[in-house]
Image: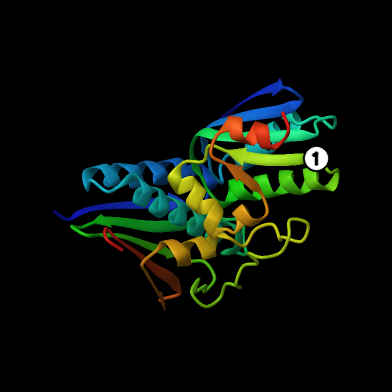
Amino acid sequence: MKVKRSLCIASDLSELDRLHDAVAELGEVGDWPPDLVYQVDLVLEELIVNTMNYGYDDDASHEIEITLISDEDVFTVEIIDDGHAFNPLDDAPEPDLDSGIEDRPIGGLGIHLMRVMMDDVHYRREENKNHLTLIKRRNG
Amino acid sequence: MEIKTQRENGILIANVNGRVDSANAREFENVLSSAISDDDTCVVVDFGGLSYISSSGLRVILLVAKSLRNRNAEFALCSLSGPIGEVFKISGFDKIISIYDSQAEACAALGG
């Protein structure tokens, strides 16, 4: 059974709770394993917060559209934002995972978590908006 | 998110409960940092009650770990659930921070 939830959030951290709740609700409806729901929830937060922090030049509030789709074996998240063009597959530097504690840089892990945790990621820039699709398979 | 601390055998134990995300990571940083006094030489953060942490929370853990390392204090994490342990592993934190299955193991390793 295909179940879809669409949310439009403001570019503000106070919206995160609503986002987490929507992912949790769809996880229950689709009977998804908690570990998988955690990963979808986490990656969504990482990307949204990235956009909020680095996506805009102005202080205005921007809208971010999020669609969550639970299908039989695939959990899909679509994110559309009007921030700077940013393809997380190509435009993010590789993280430093090997330095010792003194030299380990603070930050830069969000996109890495996305790359490792998601089964598929698609990006396109269309009409001055970023369209990002995250795919997590039940048996991925 | 809530942090309860106690001191046992010279070890500061901080039990973290709830969720740590980008919206409350600053609060997590403030509460955890102020719970650790300059005299603490051994610190264990127990994540047994933690249900969620994102990279914003990992950032705080790394800051705390760096600051304790700078003054030669010992630091360990314990009781990470499966998915949270996975986040630490994927982030390469398991190579720079000691992680134990239980609080008892962490305290024993830190000499308590």
Chain designation of label 1: B
Farthest-out residue, left: A1
Image spot of residue A82 (x, y percent): 47, 66
Q: Quadrant of the C terminus of chain A?
A: bottom left
Looking at the image, residue A17 lies above or below residue A93:
above
Q: Nearer the viewer, residue A71 or B69?
A: B69
Q: Nearer the viewer, residue A28 or A58?
A: A28
**Residue drawn at point x = 71 percent, y = 41 percent:** B75
Image spot of residue A14 (x, y percent): 51, 42
**Residue drawn at point x = 84 percent, y = 32 percent:** B38
Q: Quadrant of the N terminus of chain A?
A: bottom left
Image spot of residue A66 (x, y percent): 37, 57
**Count of labels in the image:** 1
**Is B95 left, or right, of A7 in this rendering?**
right
Q: Nearer the viewer, residue B66 or A84?
A: B66
Q: Nearer the viewer, residue B10 or A69?
A: B10
**Amino acid type at mark 1:** Ala
Please name the residue that numbered disc 1 is placed on: B73
Image spot of residue A71 (x, y percent): 20, 58
Q: Classify residue B89 by image quadrant.
A: bottom right
Looking at the image, residue B71 lies above or below residue B37:
below
> Element at badge 1?
loop
The residue carrying pointer 1 sits among few (fewer than 14), some (14 to 19) or many (20 or more) residues within 10 Å by Cα, namely some
